[in-house]
């Protein structure tokens, strides 16, 4: 691992032993950057937790190249490709062990590669950070209206919300996810750290809009966390709440889901969100999916063909 107390910018790798059929004594090298300025807080910024989510690595590369360490307050530790094997394969899961990095926390020092990365993050880097920024998008199978996510159970939810609003995504979303005990959020909560995540698009692609938002938004968030002067007023962000997973719309059968509204649109309970059209069943008429509540369309399926059990739509609710 690179030294984290050296003044200015230090770049290098964290090395993890791995043994596979293709490479018996492989060294997996996770890219790292550390920027040190004057005395101040430490923010740990993560990208590539899932390998098919690209806005985070793009924004972090831009940030490292743009920040003048002489103007920086505190320290930024950046890992743009935390799950490097998945990033290079373009997959959500780690190719070698088939695990989801954000479902194995706090990890295992004697486990598989994915478990050891989670353990290193939980035991080494997260304890030294004041703030943790975990940048995601929807990957290949989901497509989000660009959003910042804040766990509403956090003891530091006010600070996280302020930093999230400074990012300037269309939505800032309070979350309390079912899988939280297995995710990085649980470790952050146990360590009493500020954690902020994102969903910045999806469908396995990067667009000009999502890349620009991620790059500009990360710079604004870093400033809001006290590292740099604030130079601009962020775009307005609407505060909403992610519903319980029981309220997600789930695909009933293999079908092409055709949206009837756009991501980010306001909807009323009962409004048509889209239709499922069957391509292998001549006896099946299209299915109509409607909004389960008033709110805003936060997420759609990210691929044309949806499979039985896939999430096909999520409607976020107003924070009351």
Image: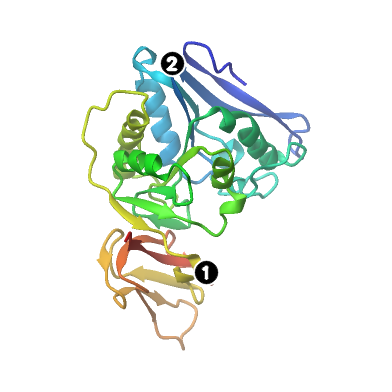
Name the image colouring. Answer: rainbow
User: How many C-alpha atoms fall within 10 Å of the one at disc 2: few (<14), some, or many (≥20)?
Assistant: few
Residue that extends furthest to the bottom in the rendered view of this protein: 283
User: How many C-alpha atoms fall within 10 Å of the one at disc 1: few (<14), some, or many (≥20)?
Assistant: some
Picture coordinates of residue 57, whole percent (x, y): 45, 35
Name the residue tied to disc 1: 307
Q: Is residue 91 above or below residue 80?
A: below
Q: Residue at x 62, y 51 (%)?
A: 182
Mark 2 element type: strand
**Nearer to the camera, 146 or 17:** 146
Looking at the rendered image, the disc whose residue lies closer to the viewer, 2 or 1, is 2
Q: Is residue 209 above or below residue 81?
A: below
Name the residue tied to disc 2: 39
How many angstroms separate mark 2 from mark 1 (CA)?
Answer: 51 Å
Mark 1 element type: loop
Q: Is residue 290 left or right of residue 255?
A: left
Picture coordinates of residue 222, whole percent (x, y): 37, 30
Q: Quadrant of residue 196?
A: top left
Picture coordinates of residue 123, whole percent (x, y): 65, 33
């Amino acid at each position: 691992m690179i030294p984290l107390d050296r003044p200015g910018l230090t770049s290098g790798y964290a090395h993890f032993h791995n043994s596979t059929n293709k490479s018996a004594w492989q060294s997996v090298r996770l890219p790292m950057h550390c920027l040190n300025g004057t005395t101040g807080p430490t923010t740990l910024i993560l990208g590539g937790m899932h390998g098919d989510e690209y806005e985070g690595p793009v924004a972090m590369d831009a940030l490292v190249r743009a920040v003048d360490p002489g103007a920086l307050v505190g320290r930024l530790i950046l890992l743009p490709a935390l799950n490097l094997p998945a990033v290079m394969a373009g997959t959500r899961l780690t190719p070698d062990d088939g695990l989801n990095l954000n479902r194995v926390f706090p990890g295992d020092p004697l486990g598989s590669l994915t478990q050891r990365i989670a353990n290193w993050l939980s035991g080494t880097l997260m304890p030294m950070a004041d703030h943790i920024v975990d940048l995601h998008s929807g990957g290949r199978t989901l497509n989000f209206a660009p959003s910042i996510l804040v766990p509403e159970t956090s003891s530091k939810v006010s600070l996280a919300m302020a930093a999230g609003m400074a990012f300037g995504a269309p939505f800032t979303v309070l979350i309390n996810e079912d899988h939280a005990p297995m995710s990085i959020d649980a470790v952050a909560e146990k360590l009493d750290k500020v954690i902020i995540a994102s969903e910045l698009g999806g469908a396995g692609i990067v667009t000009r809009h999502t890349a620009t938002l991620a790059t500009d938004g990360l710079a604004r968030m870093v400033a809001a966390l006290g590292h740099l002067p604030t130079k601009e007023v962020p775009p307005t962000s609407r505060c909403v709440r992610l519903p319980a997973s029981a309220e997600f719309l789930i695909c009933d059968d293999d079908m092409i889901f055709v949206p009837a509204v756009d991501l980010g649109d306001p909807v009323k309970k009962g409004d048509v969100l889209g239709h499922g059209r069957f391509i292998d069943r001549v006896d099946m008429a299209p299915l109509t999916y409607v909004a389960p509540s008033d709110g805003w369309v936060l997420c759609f399926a990210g691929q044309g063909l949806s499979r039985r059990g896939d999430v096909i739509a999520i409607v976020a609710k107003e924070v009351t």
